Amino acid sequence: MQGKNAIITGVSRKLGIGAALAREFAEAGVNVFISYYRPYDANMPWGNQPKEVKDLLIELKRKGIQVVGLELDLSIPEAAGQ
């Protein structure tokens, strides 16, 4: 899968499923685009830490892949075009 690209949504917590997927793809040499929306997690019982996404992006980049992260609320249909 080296050099392929993956899009993973819901990656705002380092211990979440999205982060686990991003790590697995990165280990396989797959470039990763992640989206996240921290306000959602802030309202959930598990909460979130402000640095989690930044720390995860750094961790993934150290795997030698291309990594991009974008915060957007995908419940809003127009969000991706903004």
Image (tube, rainbow, N blue to C red):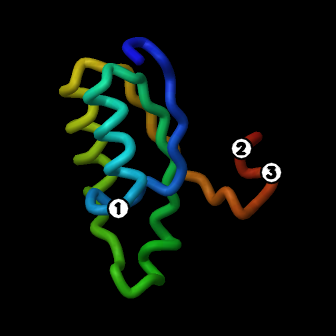
- Residue 44, image quadrant: bottom left
| Residue extending furthest toward the top | 3
Q: Secondary structure at mark 1?
A: loop
Instruction: Please report the residue visible at 80 percent of the width from the left and 55 percent of the height from the top.
Output: 77
Residue assigned mark 2: 80
- Asked whether, in this view, residue 77 is left or right of residue 14, the answer is right
What amino acid type should be assigned to the residue bearing mark 3? Glu
Q: Secondary structure at mark 3?
A: loop
Instruction: Please report the residue visible at 52 percent of the width from the left and 72 percent of the height from the top.
Output: 40
Q: Residue 48 location in percent, x, y?
A: 33, 71
| Residue extending furthest toward the bottom | 45
Mark closest to the chain's N terminus, 2 or 1: 1
What amino acid type should be assigned to the residue bearing mark 1? Gly
Residue assigned mark 1: 16
- How far apart are labels 3 and 1 at the CA level? 26 Å
- Residue 75, image quadrant: bottom right
Residue 21 lies, with reference to residue 25, above or below; the image says below
- Asked whether, in this view, residue 76 is left or right of residue 71, the answer is right
Tags 3 and 1 touching, CB below 8 Å: no
Mark closest to the chain's N terminus, 3 or 1: 1
Tags 3 and 2 touching, CB below 8 Å: yes
Q: Secondary structure at mark 2?
A: helix
Say which quadrant the C terminus sits in. top right
Say which quadrant the N terminus sits in. top left
Q: Residue 22 location in percent, x, y?
A: 37, 41
**Looking at the image, is mark 3 or mark 1 nearer the viewer?**
1
Residue 78 circle label: 3
Tags 2 and 1 touching, CB below 8 Å: no
- Decide: few, some or many residues near mark 1? Use Cα within 10 Å; few <14, some 14-19, many ≥20: few
**Looking at the image, is mark 2 or mark 1 nearer the viewer?**
1
Instruction: Please report the residue visible at 54 percent of the width from the left and 36 percent of the height from the top.
Output: 7
Residue 43 lies, with reference to residue 3, above or below; the image says below
